[in-house]
Image: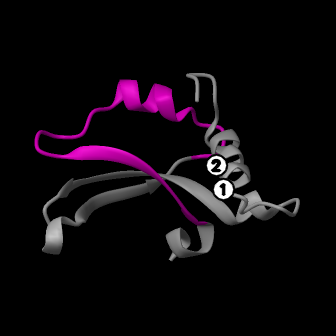
Amino acid sequence: ATPRSTARQLVREALERYGLAPEEGTSDEYVLCDVVGRPGGTGGTWQVEHLRPVGDTERPLVLQDVWKPKTGCSRRFEIRRRQEVDR
């Protein structure tokens, strides 16, 4: 990933790397999400406080530099099925 990489490019690359995008159009089923939370739930699991789908043309590394989560929270990017995020 570079500062010029778009969210759509990163999703496509990740799916290809893990063999999940054999057919054209499969990457449209997934979206990159900006997830803010903290570790420490039951068994040390991640507790999501905020989840936002990143627009296909947004640049996640630029976003990461521009906006920082509040103290005590961390950010991570996750790939999720678009259908689940839309709910």
User: How many discs mark residues in the rendered view?
Assistant: 2
* Residue sitting at x 59%, y 68%: 81
Q: Is residue 56 magenta?
A: yes
Q: Is residue 62 left or right of residue 44?
A: right
For the N terminus, the image quarter is top right
* Residue sitting at x 24%, y 40%: 69
What residue does disc 1 label? 18
Who is closer to the viewer here, 10 or 62? 10
Residue 29 at x, y percent in the picture? 70, 66
Query: Which residue is most to the front?
Result: 18
Q: Is residue 79 magenta?
A: yes
Who is closer to the viewer here, 41 or 50? 41
Contact check, label 2 and label 1, Cβ < 8 Å: yes
**Quarter where residue 8 is shown:** top right
- Residue mark closest to the camera, 2 vs 1: 1
- The magenta stretch is 55-81
Residue 64 at x, y percent in the picture? 40, 31
Residue 3 at x, y percent in the picture? 56, 22
Amino acid under disc 2: Ala
What residue does disc 2 label? 14
Above or below for 4 versus 19: above
Alpha carbon of mark 2 to alpha carbon of mark 1: how far? 6 Å
Above or below for 76 versus 67: below
Q: Look at the numbered disc 2 and give the secondary structure of its residue.
A: helix
Q: Is residue 83 left or right of residue 28?
A: left
